[in-house]
Image (cartoon, rainbow, N blue to C red):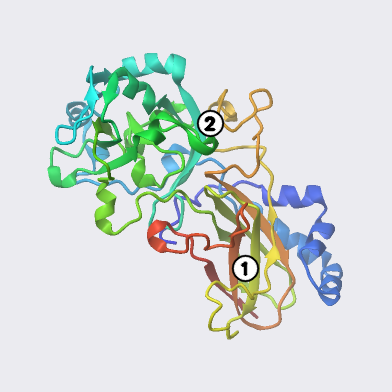
Amino acid sequence: MGDAKPFFSQHVALTRRYFLEAGVAATAISALGSSSEIAMAKATPHSVEQKLAELTGALEPYFTAPDQFRDVSRGTPIPHTLDANGLEAAGLTRDSWKLEVVADPEHPARIRAPLIIRFDELLEIGKQHAVRFPKVMTCLNIGCPLGMGIWEGVPLRELVWRTRPSENLRRLHYYGFHNGDPKQLFRSSLPIGRVLEDPFDLPPVIVCYKLNGEWLDVVRGGPVRIVVPEAYGFKSVKWLTHVVLSNLAHANDTYADGNNDIDSPLKTFAATLQIPSNATAGEPLAISGYAQVGISGLAKVQVSVHPADHEWPAGDLYFDSADWRDATILPPPREWGGALPGGSIPAETLGFDSTTAEPKHWPMRLAKAHWAIVLPGKSQGKYVLRCRTIDDKGAAQPRPRPFRKSGHAAIEQVDIDVA
């Protein structure tokens, strides 16, 4: 999973509260299987409660504070490392930033009014058109999400329409500041249909200037970046400076050069946060984790533990024959984290009820969820723990798209030693 420390650096007491409210004994027993296992759990209630208590603080906040996002920025030097004068000269401050929305000189769309817009003008448009929505930011080739936030900005289509396009507009591409070096240019693209319309109840593609209710800082791609709700991070280009309206019929994303699938949306998958890597024989195993909720939604999280020397059928590539047990998907947290102003969800955030500020659906798509389970204790030996998701279509991870180049979804495997 790479260096996940920034992702896991802050913790909240989510799991213990949920299990205690549901009833420790009942929850623990419902997570177990055979009658002998249930008898063991009943015989060691203190052990079960202790294991559940150990999960307290094992989950990161639901929303990530902006300074806790994992950073995978590009550039030599990385743009956000410029000094104050360098940032000003590069147009990477709110006072100096500007965006050009123009026709592609090589494959021109017909537009009547090329646009140059500055930050204060963008905010004026935002007074009428701004939207905000939750989204987990994930890299295509990294298993651990970079962070989860509420992103706010103006739908990109509002700027496109201001150029008064009339003909030959099939796609647009966009890029950001890149130190004046063509070799450092990083470009992404979208079909114009996705920009002008929001299919399947998706939020709009936005020109983003706020994260978790605060101005987007330069480390997170500010003062302005693109955010594409259903896409991996490479589509959400930082330090935005140009949007190019084109008659090009195909994608021209920089990321395609790395043999990546540039059009696949977010996948659904599960991973652990806390596991008993060294466990005591006979004591229940308390396990917690998170799930990235991709475009196909999330119906279940499941966990299995098997002896390390267990032999799998040759054709069982995805461990379908494992003894999978349903974990509990935890409800919305009482405290959202993320350094939100006042600790509250900003008003009119898409996906949340405008009166109660509660999620309209749970788990939310394009976001994350936490889960937990207590499994029966094991005898001495070496074991392997696996976790997976079942999406709303009934597809078990890593399906329906098991190929790495369209996004991480491999089933996590963790070794457990029971002594």
> How busy is the neighbourhood of tag 1: few (under 14 within 10 Å), some, or many (20 plus)?
some
On the question of residue 150 being in view, the answer is no
On the question of residue 254 being in view, the answer is yes
Q: Position of residue 327 (x, y in %)?
A: 69, 59
Residue flagged by tag 2: what amino acid is it?
A: Leu
> How busy is the neighbourhood of tag 2: few (under 14 within 10 Å), some, or many (20 plus)?
many
Q: What element carries label 2?
A: loop
Please tell me in which quadrant of the rendered image residue 310 appears: bottom right
204 in relation to 384, above or below: above
In the image, taking residue 163 as reference, residue 41 lies left or right, namely right
164 in relation to 287, above or below: above
366 in relation to 377, above or below: above
Residue nearest the observer in this picture, 129 or 189: 189
The residues bearing labels 2 and 1 have C-alpha atoms spaced at a distance of 32 Å
Q: Where is residue 68 in the image (x, y as percent from the top left)?
A: 44, 43
Q: Position of residue 376 (x, y in %)?
A: 75, 71
Tag on residue 140? none
Question: Residue at position x 33%, y 36% from top?
Answer: 221
Q: Please give the residue where the numbered disc 1 appears in the rendered image.
A: 276
Question: Residue at position x 13%, y 42% from top?
Answer: 181
Residue nearest the observer in this picture, 361 or 279: 361
Please tell me in which quadrant of the rendered image residue 111 appears: top left
Classify the position of the C terminus by image quarter. bottom right
**Which is more N-terminal, label 1 or label 2?**
1
Q: Please give the residue where the numbered disc 2 appears in the rendered image.
A: 340
Single out the residue that lies furthest toward the front: 167
